[in-house]
Image (cartoon, helix red, strand yellow):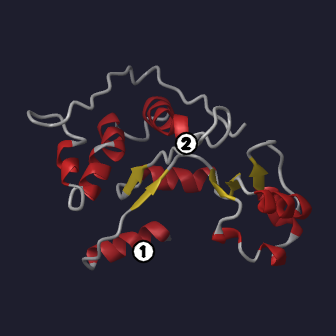
Amino acid sequence: KMLGMIAGARKRGLDVTTECYPYTAGATRIESAIFDGWETKPDEWFQTLQWVGTRERLTRSKFAEYRKQRGLGIVHANTEEQVRVAVLSPLTMIASDGFDTKPGEGHPRSSGSFSKILGQYVSEERALKLEDAVAKMTLMPARRLEARVPAMKNKGRIRVGADADVVVFDPGKGRDRSSYE
């Protein structure tokens, strides 16, 4: 539904885009406004949340405790099918949102997003062409930013005068080994 809304907005000339990372869970600070009103949530809702520090799934009381403490939580909110539809859409860029501050803590997107796209969606499933996958991770984000950040006109492209941000890899060997744990 959201991709349809984005496509419709773009047809009407609106500057709308989207990105995703290839995981069924997100991550954000537990003190984030996204969790405001948590007191009214049903008990089972808290089981969709995982505390990064202990890897435990939360209860109402644990959520209250950790919200006071502040820190990173994992939000298990998507299905594999939702992720797949987003990843394969020509509208969607691939994100990594790497912001983890301590090794072994955080979200697999920080170290595995691109490997997962290349390993699963390109090599294993052949659901995405290599060229399209690479563009979703490089050229599309560069194009998105270049109007406001002129240096991006030299990113995501291989040509004379462009920045030399080149990665050489074997697309058949890359695999994501990151986990929420």
Residue 109 relative to residue 6: left or right: right
- Give the residue displayed 84% in from the left and 55% down from the top: 58
The image's mark for residue 120 is: none
**To which quarter of the image does residue 159 belong?**
top left
Of 163 and 8, nearer the camera is 163
The image's mark for residue 109 is: 2
Q: Residues within 10 Å of mark 1 (few under 14, many from 20)?
A: few
Percent of width and height locating residue 61: 91, 62
Residue 22 relative to residue 53: left or right: left
Q: Residue furthest left?
A: 160
Of 87 and 141, nearer the camera is 141
Q: Quadrant of the C terminus?
A: top right
Q: Secondary structure at mark 1?
A: helix
Q: Residues under labels 1 and 2: Cα distance?
A: 25 Å
Q: Residues within 10 Å of mark 2 (few under 14, many from 20)?
A: many
Q: Secondary structure at mark 2?
A: helix
The residue pinned by badge 1 equals 5
Percent of width and height locating residue 2: 48, 70
**To which quarter of the image does residue 177 belong?**
top right
Which residue type carries mark 1?
A: Met
The answer to whether 62 is drawn above or below residue 129 in the figure is below
Residue 154 relative to residue 51: left or right: left
Percent of width and height locating residue 142: 27, 50
Percent of width and height locating residue 67: 78, 62
